[in-house]
């Protein structure tokens, strides 16, 4: 095994062991005593259920990640990448199409092999804890639609990347960077109207007090909304959430129907205010700029390593190709991605606190936000006391208890 193989293997094992360590620490950190802040929210049975949910989900996650690691290692060291490459090459089609077929087969194989895990998670774990509302018909439809979108949207973009690296020489990474960024921005515009409705129904929020209060608040902070929509999330799960989607004139608020059922209007307004806080504090723009720079760095590094024969030798390849180089570089990039994800999570958690402060300042109703966060933690069986290392590694949002404490601190200071 050459230096590339050693780096990639070490990165895969380190990433696996690091997450395993975080999972074990998180499980050991579970305590039977209910935090005082939640004594009037969780009853003893519900709190025990939330801890059991964390245990089951974590252990299942360990099994899943172990399977994925073993699957990759077996395929790698048995020469699977090279074997598939030789099969596809024998079809004698255009190199760009060869690359699409090669990567498409790998994605399809992984999807098929991981379907049993998705089925177990949805129809056993989520069902056991009262979350699942997904029918087998919906599950299959979602799977087919997802694969269809990968072909319709992902294949043209991938074909463009392969073509640029094949035909444009040293400038390829810049062209790929530009087209990927443009493609991503375009998706932000078309997703609300054309992609998301493939999976859920989006109905305009009916006229009434909730709609009036939402627009009243949005106007008070000079935030223009093109519309407020209700998503039929209850067709899949009882969990609650809300999100913003789109840009410019397509910018809209989406509320889960389960959220509307379980929260009061003041609580809904604070949830909305938090999301608007992200826009007002330029967090969305910040995230977009970071993503643009990140994409450019990835393509630049790819342009350097994609021509290194040692990278292909590490996977026992008979031939060098752009499409297999994309796969192998993605694995080589693992340690960099791990470090970046940690820093991005730190930044994201900081931004969440900022958005919370914006919400309580502009609504002047901190207790409604506290109540909303508590209800969300109960409805979603959140882990109230995650281990600090697990949070550091995985959480893009601060733990609910930390957010509540910070809100109360802001009010009292």
Image: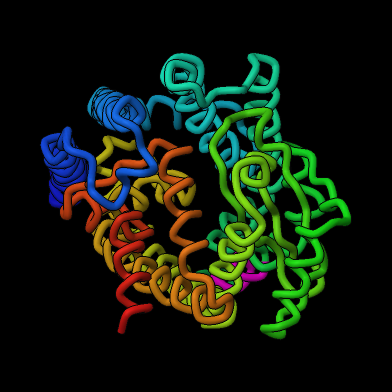
Reply above or below: 213 against 371.
Answer: below
The x and y percentages for residue 351 are 41, 73
Toward the viewer: 188 or 260? 260
- Whether residue 180 is in magenta: the answer is yes
Name the image quarter holding the N terminus. Answer: top left
Decide: is 243 above or below 61. Answer: below
- Residue ranking furthest to the front: 40
Left or right of 135 in this view: 211: right
Q: Quadrant of residue 335?
A: bottom left
Residue 156, how many percent across, how many down? Answer: 69, 50
Query: Is residue 159 visible to the viewer in this orientation of the structure?
Result: yes
Q: Residue at x 39, y 36 (%)?
A: 381
Point 16% across, 53% down: residue: 389
State the residue in front, 397 or 45. Answer: 45
Asked whether, in this view, residue 251 is left or right of residue 72, the answer is: right
Residue 263's place in the image compared with 247, above or below, is above
* Viewer-side residue, 29 vs 217: 217
282 is higher (above) or lower (below) than 120:
below
- Side of 18 where 156 appears, left or right: right
What secondary structure characterizes most of the magenta part? Answer: helix
Q: In terms of image quadrants, where is residue 391? A: bottom left
Could you tell me which residue is drawn at 34 percent across and 70 percent down? 408
Q: Give the total number of marks visible in the rendering.
A: 0
**In this picture, which residue range is highlighted in magenta?**
177-182
Residue 218, by quadrant, is bottom right
Asked if residue 168 shows in the view, the reply is no
Instruction: State the residue at coordinates (27%, 38%).
Output: 315
The image quadrant where one finds the C terminus is bottom left
Residue 42: x and y in percent read 36, 38
* In the foreground, 89 or 106: 106
Image coordinates of residue 94 in percent, x first then y, are 65, 42
Task: Inspect the magenta stretch and tell me whether residue 279 lies in it.
Answer: no
């Amino acid at each position: 095994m050459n230096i590339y193989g050693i780096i990639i293997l070490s990165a895969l094992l380190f990433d696996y062991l690091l997450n395993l360590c975080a999972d074990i620490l998180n499980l050991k950190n579970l305590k039977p005593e209910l935090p005082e802040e939640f004594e009037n929210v969780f009853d003893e049975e519900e709190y025990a259920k939330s801890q059991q949910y964390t245990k089951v989900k974590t252990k299942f996650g360990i099994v899943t990640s172990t399977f994925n690691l073993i699957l990759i290692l077996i395929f790698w060291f048995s020469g699977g990448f090279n074997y598939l490459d030789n099969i596809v090459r024998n079809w004698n089609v255009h190199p760009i199409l060869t690359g699409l077929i090669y990567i498409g087969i790998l994605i399809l194989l992984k999807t098929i092999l991981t379907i049993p895990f998705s089925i177990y998670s949805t129809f056993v774990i989520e069902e056991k804890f009262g979350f699942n509302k997904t029918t087998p018909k919906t599950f299959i439809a979602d799977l087919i639609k997802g694969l269809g979108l990968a072909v319709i949207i992902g294949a043209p973009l991938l074909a463009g990347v392969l073509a640029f690296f094949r035909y444009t020489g040293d400038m390829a990474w810049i062209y790929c960077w530009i087209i990927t960024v443009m493609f991503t921005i375009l998706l932000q515009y078309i997703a609300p109207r054309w992609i998301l409705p493939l999976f859920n129904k989006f109905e305009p929020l009916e006229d009434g007090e909730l709609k009036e209060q939402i627009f009243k608040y949005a106007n008070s902070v000079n935030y223009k909304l093109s519309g407020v929509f209700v998503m039929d999330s209850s067709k899949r799960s009882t969990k609650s959430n809300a999100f913003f989607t789109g840009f410019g004139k397509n910018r809209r608020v989406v509320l889960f129907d389960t959220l509307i059922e379980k929260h009061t209007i003041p609580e809904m307004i604070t949830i909305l205010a938090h999301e608007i806080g992200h826009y007002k504090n330029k967090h969305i723009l910040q995230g977009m700029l970071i993503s643009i720079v990140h994409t450019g760095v990835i393509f630049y590094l790819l342009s350097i390593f994609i021509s290194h024969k040692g990278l292909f030798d590490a996977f026992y390849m008979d031939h060098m190709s752009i499409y297999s180089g994309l796969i192998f570089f993605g694995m080589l990039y693992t340690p960099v991605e791990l470090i970046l994800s940690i820093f991005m999570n730190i930044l994201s958690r900081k931004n969440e606190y900022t958005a919370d402060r914006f919400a309580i300042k502009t609504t002047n109703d901190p207790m409604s936000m506290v109540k909303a966060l508590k209800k969300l933690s109960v409805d979603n069986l959140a882990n109230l006391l995650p281990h600090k290392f697990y949070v550091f590694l995985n959480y893009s949002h601060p733990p609910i208890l930390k957010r509540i404490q910070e809100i109360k601190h802001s009010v009292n200071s």
